Image (cartoon, rainbow, N blue to C red):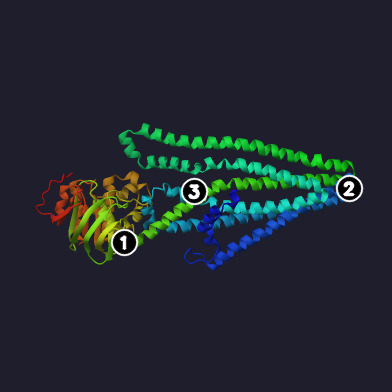
Amino acid sequence: MRIFNLQLWQNFFDITGSYWYVNDEQKRSFSEVLWSWGILGLLLFLLVSINSVNAYISYVNRDLIYILEQKDAPSFFRTLFIYAGTFVVLTPLIVFSQNLRKQLSLDWYKWLTNNILDKYFHNRAYYKINFDSQIKNPDQSISQEIEPIPSTALDFVFIILEKSLEMVAFILILWSISKPVAAFLVIYAIIGNLIIINISQQLDKVNSNKLASKGDFRYYLTHVRDNAESIAFFQGEVQELNLIKQKFAEVIDNSAQILGRELNMQLITTGYQFFLLIYPFLTVAPLFFKGEIELGEVSQASIACTQFAGGLALIVYQIGTLSSFNNLVSRLVTFSDALEQTQNQQENITIQTVEEDRFVIEQATLQTPNYEQVLIQDLSLSVEPGTGLLVVGPSGCGKSSLLRAIAGLWNTGTGRLVRPNLKEILFLPQRPYMILGSLRQQLLYPNNNNQVGDRELEIILQQVNLGDLLTRVGGFDAEVYWEKILSLGEQQRLAFARLLVTRPRYVILDEATSALDFRNEENLYRQLQEIGATFISVGHRESLLNYHQSVLQLSKEDSTWRLVPSQGYQSNFQWE
């Protein structure tokens, strides 16, 4: 039975259990843990109180019918007042209990999401996890698949407890009326629900793929959105549409299979429940006709049967939902483990990195992350302060990989890398990162130096030939969709504006001027030289030789390299 799936609960407590105890690593203080346990204790108290009031109501209902049968009007209205009073008490108890459960679920969800986010951004796990083929949609795991886990767990536990108490209370009431009727009801309910559990287990085979198929469908839609311009240029709408419809067909196929199995379950459960509506009258009414019980006890027995059977059915339903819950927990555990593995990779680094105020590479061999291919063999070089190194070579030879190694994003290989602290290095990729924020935030990113005045920022925009941008967007505090309103060339110039704001001592440029004309390229590199930065560039333009003192040419065929002065550099390398 799924409720006894030890692996499910082990996974669940591994990923969420730290919420319930003081843990400095997971950022759980004593006061926060005390609040959580306090709310849990209050919920348990309310649970017992609500079930006690429910059991009492069945007795008041019995007395009402008895008094009504006796036509005792004064006693009837006194009892009716008590009956109404129980609901006055019960209503706030139920509402308050539901609200507290939601608050506890929300707090648990907040803690769990923050915990996963900390892992996601720690040590660049958000980047490294892209190399894990098991993790396709980390954004979906964080935004959609965490929230249901705490709420489902709390609902499951409290519904099981609530209905178990309810079943015990009402079966005892029925037992006091007729022992054989109570015994048969227990046997019938157990057999009926075992059949329902067996049918519900068949749903597991298709439910396990439901989240995955929806995730793939969403991923394809996101892919089209992120690459809309490229698809439009290639006129690839038909092919993209067919791929997306294929993924959507898988979603529909899963849903159709689930509907078919749910139909079988609903037929059996509905028939099972209808019989329980008739059962108390079939079994208890004859006792009334014999004068062995009163009319009120017939009504009380009917309520007890309904409450007992309804409670058991809800417990069975909750057990049936564990398959979806198991999928969510398993996916989150897989995601969390993958994030932690990115941290453990530091123990396996074979390229030794040393932080000093210089750029030196000593006998470094760079390999692909899976160690299947050598990209660069025994590379040794140094970059003198205030000079520039240009890295050239055919596609796939390891140019960008070398930059990733310098940035600490790529670590498979051997050798020694001496570089400054990463906080002293500014990286400019071919497609600059446009943050979601204002123009001021774009220019200050990744720092938030509010001491840079508006006039200074205006001058910097003019230096990169973006003097009109301030007017176009409506000021430094304007927030727009930068990737949509700026061309790639304008984005590259805006990235250089960040460089002039930050004025780093070291700069890494990965084809950072590929979308610029030669005049703008010359202007930007000239300003880079004026601030005295040491820089390494990857590029395919022969014009870049004018701004660098040396050239590192990489070979794709045999992983070899050569380092030569840029002046008079000649090669069979195909320039852009």
**Distance from the alpha carbon under mark 2 to that under mark 3:** 58 Å
Q: Amino acid at mark 1?
A: Val
How packed mark 3 is, by other alpha carbons closer than 10 Å (few <14, some 14-19, many 20 or more), is few
Q: Which mark is residue 244?
A: none
User: How many numbered marks have been drawn onto this rendered protein structure?
Assistant: 3
Q: Amino acid at mark 2?
A: Ala
Q: Which residue is mark 1?
A: 452
Query: On residue 144, which mark appears?
Result: 3
Nearest to viewer (mark 2 / mark 3): 3
Q: Secondary structure at mark 2?
A: helix
Mark 3, mark 1: which one is toward the viewer?
3
Element at badge 3?
A: loop
Report which quarter residue 353 is drawn in. Answer: bottom left
Res. 535 image quadrant: bottom left
Q: Amino acid at mark 3?
A: Gln
| Residue 318 pos. (x, y %) | 62, 47
Dot 3 or dot 1: first in sequence order is: 3
Q: Can residue 226 be seen from the camera position used here?
A: yes
Residue 103 point in image, percent of width and height: 58, 56
Closer to the chain start, of discs 2 and 3, is 2
Residue 73 relative to residue 260: left or right: right
Q: Is 418 displayed left or right of 237 in the figure? A: left
Compare residues 162 and 460 and report the one nearer the observer: 162
Q: Please name the residue that numbered disc 2 is placed on.
A: 73
Name the residue at 64% across, 54% down.
158
State the separation of the CA atoms marked 2 and 1: 85 Å
Residue 42: percent from left, percent from top: 65, 61
Q: Nearer the viewer, residue 272 or 441?
A: 272
Name the secondary structure under disc 1.
loop
- Residue sitting farthest toward the top: 238
Tags 2 and 1 touching, CB below 8 Å: no
